[in-house]
Amino acid sequence: MQRISQQQINQQWENIEQVRRMNEVYPEPPRAFCQTFGCQQNEADTERIAGMLKEMGYEPTEEPAEASVIVVNTCAVREHAEKRVLGIIGRYTHLKETNPELTICMCGCMVQQEHITEKIKKSYPRVDIVFGTHALWRFPELLLRRLGGSKRLFEIGGSDEGEIAEGLPVLRGKGCHAWLSIMYGCNNFCSYCIVPYVRGRERSRLPEVIEQEMRELVAEGYKDITLLGQNVNSYGKDLDEPIDFSDLLARLDAIPGDYRIRFMTSHPKDASAKLFRTMANGTHISHQLHLPFQSGSDEILKRMNRKYDSAQYRALIAEAREAMPDVVLSSDIIVGFPGETEEDFLQTLRMVEDVEYDLLYTFLYSKRTGTPAATMPDSATQEEKQERFDRLLKTQERIIERRQNAYVGKTVRVLIDGTGKQPSDYPMAGRTDGGLLVLCRGNNLNIGDFVEINIEKASLRALFGTQV
Ligand code: SAH
Ligand code: SF4
Ligand code: F3S
């Protein structure tokens, strides 16, 4: 792993400056439109791209048709995500008919794959710049070259080891929520997953750099800060100084202020009692745990290369609940992994029934070229898989209904973070400390307020209540 040198970062700032000067000739600042597919890491990456664009003199816009630069940050985790990206790119390239000056960029996980880059080279001639996850920090250089008349640019950049680039700008979304990446990449190579191939090896940001950023976020008034990594529990393993994720969490929690910390994602193989204790003893740490188990069947877990079995997983959940009786639990599940039998699936259902999650993210297995699972024999039909998937959703609905209803009559602390979608009796939206959605009413509720809300009713998606 390489830390990008200050000199190389300064070079990017010079490129930023040059693009900014080119943009100054326009009577009005040109616009840039960014769109993100995929996970929170990608959201955080887009904020970096948006930050660079802003410094280069572009104003953000929500409207692709008025943009001079479009950046689509892509995801490769499932086929569906890739298809959607290609559909959208097709649409954006048509905008060049009325706006020939438009620059179209694609970046992120999907384009880190060679077969995709080849496809774009051949079939999407109007895409100007393609840059992978390892080349993100070099975006200003690529844009400057293309604006200066270079031919189309394809830049995957770096090695699988990956880099860490500090000191480039960020433009965060509005509101009181902020992402804070603590590490990049993944070393786990779950057999179905493309992420380790497109994001490189695990690499941790230095604790003092993370702490500094956290202090700035708190000082700027962010109230809800999510620490990000594909597997935050391996934080620090690659650093010289002895520090693990629990240590980092405790160190950040010591920063004074009115805020809360969440984190995503924890891999069960190295979640620990130490982590749960740190969460339970923290002042600002949300009692929210996203601990994906993927499958309840030990045989499937082995073939998924998850490195834990269902008994170990159950023991972890018990430990977490003992340390934090109010913990809000969620998980990811894959249905229809190659070779999954009805009996395997029933074990997944059993896990869901026994644990009683507050939230589940369920996915139908999607074959990813280049992963070991892609060549594993499969016997279940798509219909069988879909039927299992639907059964899982029904089971979870019953559980959520029960769990959500249990909040009625209780008072919970909520961070107001937005407005409801449509005019309603409950115009404001917020999240409990555990991350549950609450639609609220009250006198003078403002975004960024922590308030006590009495829950009056519940649906599958949200709790509804009035300020105490
Ligand atoms: N690092 C995180 C997950 C990142 S991907 C973790 O390990 O928990 C988010 C989720 O997408 C995974 O948890 C998994 O449930 C799902 N996923 C990944 N690859 C998939 C595939 N090929 N098909 C279907 N779902 C997949
Ligand atoms: Fe993918 Fe597994 Fe890494 Fe998560 S831990 S990103 S599922 S390989
Ligand atoms: Fe997708 Fe890349 Fe995230 S593949 S889920 S955007 S790490």
Image: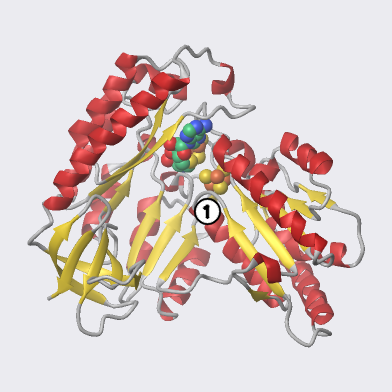
Q: Residues within 10 Å of mark 1 (few under 14, many from 20)?
A: many
In the figure, 341 relative to 314: above or below? Answer: above
Observer-nearest of 412 and 166: 412
Quarter assignment of residue 455: bottom left
Q: On the image, numbered disc 1 is attached to which residue? A: 41
Count of numbered badges drawn on the protein: 1
- Residue 38, position as x, y percentages in the image: 53, 49
Residue that sits furthest to the bottom in the current view: 27
Q: Is ligand 3 within 8 Å of the beta carbon of the residue shown at mark 1? A: yes
Observer-nearest of 378 and 248: 378
Residue 176 appears in view:
yes
Give the quarter the ligand 3 occupies: top right
- Residue 4, position as x, y percentages in the image: 70, 58
Residue 200 appears in view:
no
Quarter assignment of residue 421: bottom left
The residue shown at (33%, 60%) is: 250
In the figure, 1 relative to 269: above or below? Answer: below
Quarter assignment of residue 146: bottom right
The residue shown at (56%, 51%) is: 37
Observer-nearest of 187 and 150: 150
- Residue 232, position as x, y percentages in the image: 43, 48
* Residue type for callout 1: Gln
Q: Is residue 407 left or right of residue 70?
A: left
What quarter of the picture does the C terminus occupy?
A: bottom left
- Residue 441, position as x, y percentages in the image: 21, 74
In the figure, 380 relative to 388: above or below? Answer: above
The residue shown at (79%, 65%) is: 102
Residue that sits furthest to the left in the current view: 409
Q: Which secondary structure lies at badge 1? A: helix
Q: Is residue 283 left or right of residue 57?
A: left
